[in-house]
Amino acid sequence: QVHVVESGGGLVQAGGSLRVSCAASGVTLSTVAVGWFRQAPGREREFVAAINRSGSSADYADSVKGRFTISRDNAKNTVYLQMNSLKPEDTAVYYCAVRRFGALGQRQNNYDYWGRGTQVTVSS
């Protein structure tokens, strides 16, 4: 059984940085594509970033390009999302998702396993 767990969320001031982590059991993250999504209050969940199995390729939403970086530490079976220059509009619950088969992608229905999310709040 696969379990995905996010951690590292919190409260940060605008312009600050935060790193959220995604750990999993029941699957080796280095063998799957992993994505980050977020859902702000009153809005639909949206794609943020994704990384392929090897870590050689990543994709980002336009709204976070140049500010967020997705990476993986295969030795720790963990994927990270480093968030810099945070803005109040980045406030959301951030979800990690695992895609067992196929390349990285932006579509939510391509992902098979989801965590429960971690809250990120950016104050102005």
Image (spheres, rainbow, N blue to C red):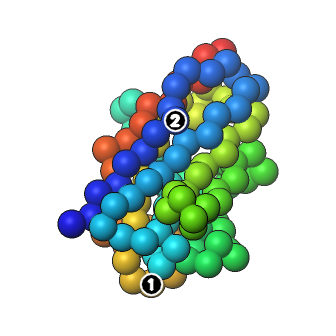
Q: Quadrant of the N terminus?
A: bottom left
Residue sitting at the far front: 75
Helix, strand or loop at mark 1:
loop
**Which residue in the protein does label 1 denote?**
102
**Which amino acid does the dot numbered 1 rest on?**
Gly
Label 1 or label 2, whichever lies nearer to me, is: 2
Picture coordinates of residue 33 (x, y %)?
49, 73
Is 71 rendered above or below residue 67?
below
Residue 80 in view of the camera: yes
Instruction: Give the alpha-carbon distance from disc 1 to disc 2, as whole Å.
Output: 27 Å
Could you tell which of marks 1 and 2 lies nearer the N-terminus?
2
Residue sitting at the far bottom: 102
Q: Along the horizontal axis of the image, is 18 left or right of 9?
A: right
Residue 39 in view of the camera: no
Residue at horizontal 44 percent and vertical 54 percent from the top: 23
Picture coordinates of residue 9 (x, y %)?
50, 32
Residue at horizontal 42 percent and vertical 37 percent from the top: 118
Q: Along the horizontal axis of the image, is 41 left or right of 92?
A: left
**Which residue in the protein does label 2 denote?**
8
Name the image quarter holding residue 114: bottom left
Residue at horizontal 43 percent and vertical 71 percent from the top: 28
